Image: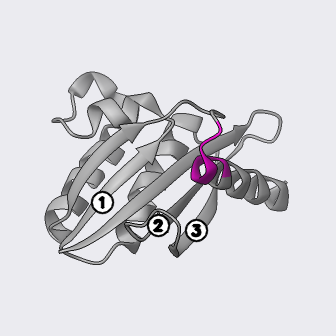
Amino acid sequence: MREFIVYTDGGYSISHNIGSGAYVILKPDGQTVVKQGSFVLYRETSQRAELKAIIEALYALPDHSRALIITDYQYAALSLGTRPRRKNKPDIDLLLRYRQLVRYKKLTIEFQWVPSHGGHRWNEVCDNLCAEALAAAS
């Protein structure tokens, strides 16, 4: 089973009603970038951008992988490892897509939460990728 460390982040510009998400996939050494990506979203929330960043990272992982996803979105870190609850109706589609993707690709996923802008190198890289995507779309 191949192992990876994945950082994700999401952002949102209220003035332009545009969101963005980004991910960086690293080898287990925590230094070597395997892949990174970013994207923009229109008329979506920052919460959905955060969740979509995680989902996009999962699409980029090889099947049968094990990954530690490190995110500054505490809701994801706490809730994605459990069964999605119906009270999260605005995001239930993404929570279900996450679970289906993990099952389909036979991924083993763990989460770790880090504080936003806490000086974590790769979290800051993801934040910068989000800002660049927002700037390019504005």
Q: Is residue 59 left or right of residue 9?
A: left
Q: Position of residue 131 (x, y in %)?
A: 76, 51
Dots 3, 1 in contact, CB < 8 A: no
Q: Secondary structure at mark 1?
A: strand
The residue to which callout 2 is attached is 25
Q: Is tag 3's residue or tag 2's residue first in the polypeptide sequence?
A: 2
Q: Is residue 45 left or right of residue 89?
A: right
* Observer-nearest of 90 and 120: 120
| Vertical relation: 4 (above or below) 45 | below
Dots 1, 2 in contact, CB < 8 A: yes
The answer to whether any part of residue 20 appears in the image is no
The residue to which callout 1 is attached is 67
Q: Which residues are magenta?
A: 119-124
Per the model, the C-alpha gap separating discs 3 and 2 is: 9 Å
Image quadrant where one finds the N terminus: bottom left
Q: Secondary structure at mark 2?
A: strand
Q: Secondary structure at mark 3?
A: strand
Which amino acid, mark 3?
A: Gly
| Vertical relation: 135 (above or below) 117 | below
The residue to which callout 3 is attached is 37
